[in-house]
Image: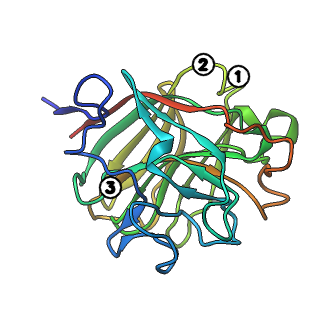
Amino acid sequence: MPTLYSMIHSGGTTLNTSKWIEQIADQHGIWDDNGKLPYPYSSVGNQGGNNAEYGSPDQVAVNSGLTLNAARSTAFSGYTWKAGYVTTHGKFTFSKGYFQARAKLPDSRTGGWAGIWFLDGGGEIDLNESGYTACGSSVVNSCVASNLNTTGNSQKFYSAGVDLSAGYHVYGMEYKPGKSITMYFDGKQIAQYTTNIPTGSYTIILTETMAQNASGWHTLISGSTPSPMSPYQISEVQLWQ
């Protein structure tokens, strides 16, 4: 029988710290922008890059589920936003199996960039990134962007046909080491990779980021982007191994 891990909270409004930290990290440690960000802050991208935000624990909330927020902040030079990140770095990895998250995405039309992704196993896996314009600039909130970042693979897009910020949907990923990685949306297969499949163990990453310097492929923050940004809400995170 498969083993089911229910992983968000340990009861009430407390993050399950046996599984999660409130930073972004990989096998090299916390991503602190080359030492520019003090603990407990971190950043998906370095200042001035595609990410406008740094990760701040005060943008992570738990209440019968996980909420990642984002708000304007100039506390650190080079960043104009702060946002919520959680990862299982140093706490939990999986080497095979089926992962799924039930989530309600933020309104990504003004620069929101929510992610469900995985690191450390031998090539970044992106189950979904919001805010991509590949499905059409008028339907940004219906576009699911998946990727396996290994040689011979590329990003794939699926138009869900519904506003993903209007309700909860289930995002799934099956990992068969050395064989295949398959993505699902509400139980429907939407992408599959069979070339250069990793074989290592992965951490789970959930991030609410904000996009800048990404014209032509992603929505961008501007003066009209609401602060706080509409939340990224995750009601369930599960893994069968």
Percent position (x, y) of residue 94?
Answer: 24, 51
Q: Position of residue 160 (x, y in %)?
A: 67, 29
Give the label on residue 81, or none: none
**In the image, 150: left or right of 49?**
left
Mark 2 vs mark 3: which is more N-terminal?
A: 2
Which is closer to the viewer, label 2 or label 1? 2
The residue singled out by tag 1 in the image is 162
Helix, strand or loop for disc 3: strand
The answer to which of 63 and 219 lies nearer the viewer is 63
Q: Nearer the viewer, residue 176 or 68?
A: 68
The circle on residue 167 is 2
Where is 232 relative to 93, above or below? above
Instruction: For marks 1 and 3, give the CA distance.
Output: 29 Å
Q: Position of residue 128 (x, y in %)?
A: 56, 44
Q: x, y percentage for residue 186?
A: 51, 24
Q: Which residue is mark 3?
A: 203
Tell me which residue sits at (32%, 33%) in the image: 8
Q: Secondary structure at mark 2?
A: loop
Q: Secondary structure at mark 1?
A: loop
